[in-house]
Amino acid sequence: MINYILKRLMYILLALFVIVTVTFFLMRLAPGSPFANERNFPPQIEEKLNETYGLNNPWYIQYKDYLIDTATFNFGESMKYKARSTNDMIAESFPVSLTLGIEAMLLAIGFGVLIGVISALYHNKFPDYLATSIAVLGISVPSFILAGLMQYFLAYKLDIFPTAGWNGFIYSILPALAIAFSHAGFIAKLTRSSMLEQNSSDYVKMARAKGLGKWTVVFRHTLRNALLPVVTYLGPLTAGVVTGSFIVEQIFAVPGLGKHFVQSITNRDYTVIMGTTVFYSIILLFAVFIVDILYSIIDPRIKLKGAKK
Amino acid sequence: MTQQPIDKDLFRVVGVNEDDSDKLAKKSVSFWKEVFIRFSHNKMAIAGLVILAIIILMAITVPMFSQYKYSDQLGVYNSPPSAQFWFGTDDLGRDIFVRIWAGARISLFIGITAALIDLIIGVLWGSVSGLAGGRVDNIMMRIADVLTAVPYLLVVIVLLVVMQPGIVPMIIALSITGWINMARIVRGEVLSIKNQEYVLAARTLGASTGHLIMKHLIPNALGAILVTMTLTIPSAIFTESFLSYLGLGVPAPRASWGTMASDGNKAIADYPWRLIFPAVFISLTIFAFNAIGDGLRDALDPKLRK
C-alpha cells in the first residue's frame, strides 16, 4: 500500500513537471502579448514592463525562475489586472467554484443513483424507459447548451430562478444543475447496469426469498455492491465538474476560478494562465489519486497495482 | 414409501437415424454475422445509425445544392424560421439551415479525423508495447501513464491558445492526448491474445511479427478498437464545440456547430432559434455515436451470446 502511494505520488510530481514545462514553453511561443492592448505606451514603459516581469531574460533563466516560483506556489502578479497577484485571484475565486462544484457533484450523484435505481427496479417497464431517456438526454446534451437553454426558459421566460450572478443559494441552483446533468446521466447508466447485474445474483434472490421488501433489499444489499462502478467514476466526475465550470460560470456570471481561467486565456494573461493551470492540475491529479485509494478501501477484492505484500 | 418396480416393457428402442446425427441443430454463423444480427436487434443503435446516416447525407448534399452559401449575407437579419429560411437567419443575415449543414461537415470532419489519428497512433503504440514486453513495454506505458495524468482539456486549451485557431490545430490538439486510451486498450488486448496457444503455434510455424500483428492480433482486437473509436468521435465533437464556445474554435466565416451555439447563446433572449438548432444537432450527433458505440459493445460481448 505504501509502495503504491509513493509510486503514485511520483507520477503526480512527474505529470506536474510535464504540465509546468509544457505550459511554460507554449506560452513563450504564443502569439500576442499581455500588453497588446496598451500599445500606445511609450516604448520605454513597455521595456520597463517586460523587465519587471522578467520577459527580457534568456529563456533558461525565465524557466528556472518559473520553476522556482511554481515550487513555492508564487505565481506572481497578473499581467492584466495591475497589483493583483495570481494567488489572490485563486484564493478569492476558488471558494465560489468549490461551493458550486460540491453542489454539482452532490446533485449528479444523487440524481444519477436515484434514476439508475428506479430504472433497474422497473427493468423494461415504463419508469425504466423514462429514466433511461433522461439519462441519454443528459449524456447527449453538452453542458453549455443546457446552461443556455435553462437560463432562457427557467430564468428568463418563467422567472423561477435568477438569471445570473452569485448572491446566495438560489443563484447556484441553475449553474450546478447545468454542470451536474450530463454526469447524472452517466452515473444513472452505470448504476442501472450494475444494479441489474447484482439483481440476478444469488444473495439478492435469497434476500427476496426471506421476504424482505423491495426497497430494503435495494438499500441493504444491492445498492452497496452496485455503487462500486460509481466510485470509479468519481475521478472523471471531479475533472468534469472542474472543466464544466469554465463555461457555465461564464454563462451565469459566477465569479469563480473557471471564469478567471477563461478570461485569462482571452487576455493572454500568462501568469494567471500558468497559475490556474498548475492549480487545476494539482486538484485533478489528487482527486483521481484519492479515488483510487478509496476504491481499494471500499472493495477489498481490488489489489492495488504495484502493491507488494 | 414403497418402491414401484420398473418394468422393462415400459421402454422401447427408438433407434438412431444415422443421417440425422451429423446435422447441426442451429445453422452455424460466423462471428461478425452474429454481431450484425445482435446489433440489428438493438433499437437504440439502429436509431443512432439512421440519425447519423441522415446527418451525413444532409451534410454532403445541402451545401452542394443549396441556393445560398454558408457565408452569404442575405440582408435579412435575425429572421425567425420561415418558408424561405427554414431555420431562420443569424445577426449577419446568413441562412442557418445552410450553416448547420456546412457546420456538420466541419464538426464531423474534426471528430472523425481526430478519432482516426487516435486509432493509428494508439494501435501502433499499444501493439508495439504489448508485443515487445519487458523494458520497452515498461517505458512506453510509463510515458502513457504520465500523459494520462495530465488533464486533457487543460492541455488542449493551452495548445489552442498558442496555435492560431483553425481546423488543423483543433485536430492536433484533440489527438495529442486522445490516443492514450486507445493505446491502453490495444495493449491489453494484445497481452491477452499473445499468450494464447494459437499464436504460439503460429510462431512455432515461423510466422513473422508483422504477420502475427496483421493476421492474428488486429482481427482479434478489432472489436475493442471499433467500440473505442465509435465512442471517441462523440467526445471529440463535444470537445470541439466546447472549445469553440471558449472562442478557440474554427474562425469566422466558417461555421462549426460549436461556434454557432456559442454565437446563439449570446443572443438567446431575443433570437432563441440561433441556439436551438445547433444545440439539437450537436446533441443528436453525440447521441447517435454513443448509441452506435454502446450497441456495438453489447453486440461484440460474447457473454451476451444467446
Image: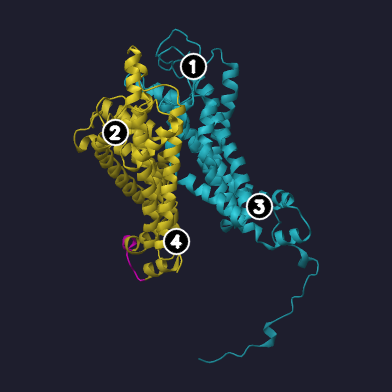
| Disc on res. B220 | 3
CA gap between label 4 and label 1 equals 52 Å
| Whether labels 2 and 4 share one chain | yes
What are the residue bounds of the magenta stretch? A210-216
Q: Which residue is mark 2?
A: A86
CA gap between label 4 and label 3 equals 28 Å
CA gap between label 2 and label 1 equals 36 Å
Q: Which residue is mark 4?
A: A304
CA gap between label 1 and label 3 equals 45 Å
Rendering colour (chain B) = cyan
Q: Secondary structure at mark 1?
A: loop
Type of amino acid under label 3: Asn
Q: Residue at x 59, y 44 (%)?
A: B122
In the foreground, A232 or A191: A232
Q: Residue at x 40, y 61 (%)?
A: A296
Type of amino acid under label 2: Thr
CA gap between label 2 and label 4 equals 37 Å
From the viewer's perspective, tell me whether residue A240 is left or right of residue B134: left
Which class describes the residues within 10 Å of circle 2: few (<14), some (14-19), or many (20+)?
A: many
Which class describes the residues within 10 Å of circle 4: few (<14), some (14-19), or many (20+)?
A: some
Rendering colour (chain A) = yellow
Q: Position of residue B204 (x, y in %)?
A: 76, 61
Which class describes the residues within 10 Å of circle 1: few (<14), some (14-19), or many (20+)?
A: few
- The verdict on residue A215 being magenta is yes
| Whether labels 2 and 1 share one chain | no
In the foreground, B186 or B139: B139
